[in-house]
Image (tube, helix red, strand yellow):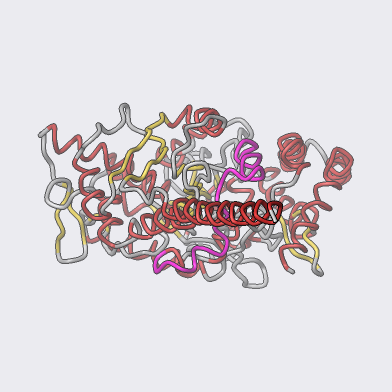
């Protein structure tokens, strides 16, 4: 009987312990679930001005008022940002939100080790985040897994820029395809487009990096870095169309239609021949076109701007436009698991990022504070406030830094800076029209999302093999056999492994 009482008491004790444990477990689960949906949002963000915004500045107050969150930003100088980010990720003090500028080795390793939340199936639940461009979401992912909210950038920036006055002087129309472009470059080189009676002009000006040659190879239909052929991803440089593109460039170099120093011309000197009347075509971006146009307007206020024409991307021989897009993003905002510990906290952080895509916040991050930095005219344009007031300048400087945390997934900001003249308005309208046309014909890189072991360890070496060979081929230093030798060297140096690994990821992503 005594033993039974003892067993009975033990049973009660065990049951009580079980109940207490269960209750304690539930309490801990409840505590974890409710832990720290905080009033504060912490971020690490690069700044591009001389000094970072001061704590409690006017921009910060506007964000806090709108979102209902106190924001605490660790501002890091842009040149040292990647190093600082990697140090931070290895520490015990990681902000909730981190601006990740690119898929470098440090980020890739951290993501694969579980440092960041997987947002692949999360963004669809938020009104603004769910409207992100699927192509850009895929490109910004890491092997198909989305680790951040991308920072949107203009999708279409590439254009052919031409001296309009030279076109008029040689009696040619703006080029629509690569044959037209060749003919214009030939006329600009061999005729007298500036009318000075001297043989001192060159058709196409190219500096020592690849923008123009990429436009050519993509424009000939080679694909953008990679292309899909019969269900497999193939490096663009292995296609016939790529060879046609660099053969086109080589022919122009041989005939003197491209500047002889294209392999060494410094990019900061690129505009000079065009502005000085020594070269008539540049293949680059709309921002460069605008910069050149401003320089020519300053040199010749009456007629300078009218001398610059833009035509966007031009067509291949079959009339198809294969337009060169950007990646559509510049880094992304990733959410740390170390400081965002559960789904409730994650929802809180994503709700904050969603609110930052509302119109009011886009206006703030893009322009600053209305009435302080700018005013709205005709419900269409912004006009900057010109003021020597230090407070106004402080807000303007702060806006440039806060713009680094802007994602701008959907275009809810309808305002642009007011053009100074009717001609400026026409130029802006033409640019918008060409961008819309070329966006419909954009050729995306189908492997943009994929980061393989081989590329992480050997990517720079592999890229350099092809870059060097392309320059040598276009310059006439190697022939087609030499070009093929370079491709073979690329394959032996790890390229074959890269193709296999990339296709493994591609096929897994398609399942």
Which residue occupies the extreme front position in the image?
Answer: 1
Q: Quadrant of the N terminus?
A: bottom right
Q: Quick check: can you spot residue 152?
A: no
Please state the extent of the stretch shown in magenta in the rendering.
104-128
Q: Position of residue 41 (x, y in %)?
A: 36, 45
Observer-nearest of 344 and 78: 344
In this rendering, the answer to whether 227 lies above or below 53 is below
In this view, 327 is above or below 267: below
- The answer to which image quadrant residue 112 occupies is top right
The residue drawn where x is 31% and y is 41% is 400
Does residue 14 appear to the left or right of 409 in the view shown? right
Give residue 130's position: percent from left, percent from top: 46, 67
> Residue 408: x percent and y percent?
39, 57
Q: Could you say where residue 149 lies in the image, as x and y percent from the top left?
A: 48, 54
Q: Is residue 264 above or below residue 171?
A: above
Q: Is residue 202 magenta?
A: no
Asked whether 17 or 398 is in front, the reply is 17
Q: Is residue 104 above or below residue 10?
A: above
Snapshot quadrant of residue 109: top right
């Amino acid at each position: 009987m005594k033993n039974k009482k003892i067993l009975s008491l033990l049973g009660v004790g065990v049951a009580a312990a079980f109940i207490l444990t269960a209750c304690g477990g539930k309490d801990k689960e409840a505590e974890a679930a409710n832990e720290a949906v905080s009033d504060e949002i912490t971020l690490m963000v690069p700044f591009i001005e001389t000094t970072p915004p001061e704590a409690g500045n006017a921009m910060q107050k506007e964000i806090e008022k709108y979102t209902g969150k106190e924001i605490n930003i660790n501002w890091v100088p842009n040149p040292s940002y990647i190093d600082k980010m990697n140090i931070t990720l290895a520490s015990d003090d990681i902000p909730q939100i981190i601006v990740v500028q690119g898929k470098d080795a440090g980020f890739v390793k951290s993501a694969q080790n579980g440092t960041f939340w997987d947002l692949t199936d999360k963004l669809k639940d938020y009104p603004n985040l769910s409207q992100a461009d699927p192509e850009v979401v895929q490109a910004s992912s890491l092997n198909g897994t989305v680790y951040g909210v991308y920072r949107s950038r203009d999708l279409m920036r590439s254009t052919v820029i031409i001296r309009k006055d030279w076109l008029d002087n040689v009696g040619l129309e703006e080029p629509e395809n690569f044959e037209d472009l060749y003919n214009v470059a030939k006329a600009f080189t061999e005729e007298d487009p500036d009318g000075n009676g001297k043989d001192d002009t060159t058709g196409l000006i190219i500096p020592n990096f690849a923008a123009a040659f990429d436009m050519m190879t993509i424009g000939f239909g080679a694909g953008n870095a990679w292309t899909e052929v019969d269900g497999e991803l193939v490096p663009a440089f292995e296609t016939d169309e790529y060879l046609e593109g660099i053969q086109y460039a080589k022919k122009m170099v041989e005939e003197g239609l491209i500047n002889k120093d294209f392999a060494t011309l410094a990019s900061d000197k690129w505009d000079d021949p065009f502005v000085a009347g020594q070269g008539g075509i540049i293949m680059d971006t709309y921002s460069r076109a605008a910069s050149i146009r401003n320089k020519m307007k300053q040199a010749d206020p009456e007629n300078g701007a009218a001398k610059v024409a833009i035509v966007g991307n031009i067509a291949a021989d079959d009339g198809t436009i294969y337009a060169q897009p950007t990646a559509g993003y510049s880094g992304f905002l990733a959410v740390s698991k170390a400081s965002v510990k559960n789904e409730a906290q994650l929802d809180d952080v994503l709700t904050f990022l969603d609110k930052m895509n509302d119109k009011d916040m886009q206006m703030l991050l893009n322009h600053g504070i209305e009435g302080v930095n700018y005013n709205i005219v005709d419900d269409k344009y912004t006009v900057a406030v010109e003021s020597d007031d230090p407070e106004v300048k402080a807000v303007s400087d702060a806006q440039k830094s806060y713009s680094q945390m802007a994602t701008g997934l959907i275009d809810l900001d309808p305002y642009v800076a007011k053009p100074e003249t009717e001609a400026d308005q026409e130029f802006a309208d033409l640019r918008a029209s060409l961008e819309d046309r070329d966006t419909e014909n954009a050729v995306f890189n189908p492997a943009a999302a994929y980061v393989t072991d081989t590329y992480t360890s050997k990517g720079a070496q592999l890229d350099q093999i092809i870059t060097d060979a392309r320059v040598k081929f276009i310059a006439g230093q190697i022939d087609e056999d030499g070009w093929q030798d370079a491709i073979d060297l690329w394959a032996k140096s790890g390229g074959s492994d890269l193709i296999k690994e990339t296709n493994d990821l591609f096929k897994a992503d398609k399942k």
